[in-house]
Amino acid sequence: MQVVLLQDVKSLGKKGDVVKINDGYARNYILPKKLGVEANAANLNDLKLQKANSEKIEAAKVAEAKALSEKLGGAAVTLKIKTGEGGKTFGSVTGKEIAQAIKEELGVDIDKKRIVLPEPIKSVGTREVLIKLHKEVNANLRVKVEEA
């Protein structure tokens, strides 16, 4: 029997896959637990429409991320950090502080988890910071750290 999976099933397939399984496994496990539906013409057509809709939504998200990437690409934010004698800093600049500065200076709300810092910024200067806007789209932002 062929079945269209409605959810990921371990060792069988992912959501949206059409798989061939034993009749008993389908009738006694997959269908009663709503993990899949029989692969008839109507269900295959529904699957095709759902995939087209999800691709359209994904394309819109990628386009939005690319537009945001262009906006952030040429931008720079400035942060101030307390320093002591000899330029020694107290604390560091984290992703949370960078996200807050982006929101204040550029008016763009970015989640702090999307900002990739290999290590916290602990010195004064200008750095390039990677921002993952989408799995396919990244942006580089200049962060200027100045003495307070």
Image (cartoon, rainbow, N blue to C red):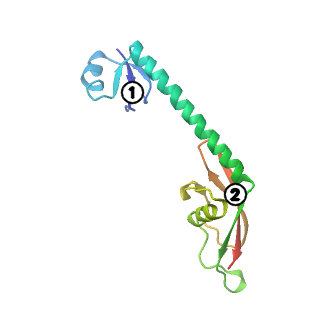
Percent across and percent down for residue 110 are 58, 55
Instruction: Decide if residue 65 is on the left or right side of residue 40.
Output: right
Q: Which residue is mark 2?
A: 141
The quarter of the displayed image where residue 14 is located = top left
- Give percent across and percent down for residue 13: 42, 28
- Considering the image in quadrants, where does the C terminus appear? bottom right
Question: Is residue 23 or residue 58 the one in the foreground?
Answer: 58
Residue 30's place in the image compared with 112, above or below, is above
Residue shown at 63% from the left, 53% from the top = 131
Mark 1 packing: few (<14 Cα in 10 Å), some, or many (20+)? few
Mark nearest the camera among 1 and 2 is: 2
Q: Please report whichever mark, 1 or 2, sits nearer to the chain's N-terminal start.
A: 1
Q: Amino acid at mark 1?
A: Leu
Q: CA distance from mark 1 to mark 2?
A: 43 Å
Query: What quarter of the picture does the N terminus occupy?
Result: top left
Which image quarter: residue 99?
bottom right
